Amino acid sequence: MCLLLGAPGVGKTLLMKRLHKITSKDTEDLSDVPPTQPTVGTNLTDLTIHRTRVTVREVGGSMGPIWSSYYKDCKSVLFVVDAANPFQVSASCIQLLSVLSSPLLVTASVLIIFNKMDLASSMSLVEMKSLFRMDDIISCAKQPITILEISALDGTGLQGILQWLHSSSDSKN
């Protein structure tokens, strides 16, 4: 099980829809943007990546206080941050630290995703890493942490997420 976490409005639902579309045998055309609504509760999605099935549970951002009830069978975490919303950075950092400090996630692999890099208002990867004090977080965390910058809207970086999910699921089997 992989958990998809992040504050409300960071793009988790669109990200899942895009990843599902890419991994389905349908087509990889990402020109049509699917409609999304804020997730209330959770959404389960199975992705097939190189014949490996990965189940991703998206947990609504407003459910942050009870995310820990979903940690038990979690092998990996996708943590999404809105790189275009400077007002959300401190709250996202606190949520990330809470996730990383959970004893139930000590062996989980973590992918931190800076989303919305396509927007003119987005901060650079260097700025995001600095605001999060990412070097300090990585050096103190027990989990392996990877960082990617993406745009769920235009599809930039999505293949990197799929590669990470595939290698993460392989190493956990």
Image (cartoon, rainbow, N blue to C red):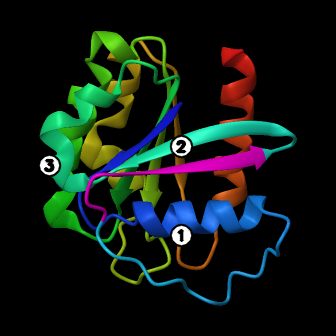
Residue to which mark 2 is pinned: 56
Q: Position of residue 116 (x, y in %)?
A: 43, 71
Which residue: 56% across, 86% down?
A: 33
Label 2 – label 1 distance at C-alpha: 16 Å
Classified by dominant secondary structure, the portion drawn in magenta counts as strand
Label 3 – label 2 distance at C-alpha: 23 Å
Q: Viewed as shown, does residue 32 lie left or right of 80?
A: right
- First in sequence: mark 3 vs mark 2: 2
**Residue situated in front as seen by the camera: 121 or 1:** 1
Of badges 3 and 2, nearer the viewer stands: 2
Q: Are marks 1 and 3 in contact (CB under 8 Å)?
A: no
Label 1 – label 3 distance at C-alpha: 21 Å
Q: Mark 2 Cα within 10 Å, few/some/many (few <14, many 20+)?
A: many
Residue range in magenta is 39-48
Question: Is residue 138 magenta-colored?
Answer: no
Which residue: 33% across, 30% down?
A: 70
Secondary structure beneath dot 1 equals loop
Q: Position of residue 98 (x, y in %)?
A: 21, 28
Which residue: 64% across, 72% down?
A: 155
Mark identifier at residue 84: none
- First in sequence: mark 2 vs mark 1: 2
Residue 122: name its quadrant: bottom left
Q: Mark 1 Cα within 10 Å, few/some/many (few <14, many 20+)?
A: many
Residue to which mark 3 is pinned: 91
Of badges 2 and 1, nearer the viewer stands: 2
Q: Position of residue 89 (x, y in %)?
A: 21, 54
Residue to which mark 1 is pinned: 152
Amino acid type of the residue that numbered disc 1 sits on in the rendered structure: Ala
Q: Mark 3 Cα within 10 Å, few/some/many (few <14, many 20+)?
A: few
Q: Viewed as shown, does residue 136 lie left or right of 93?
A: right
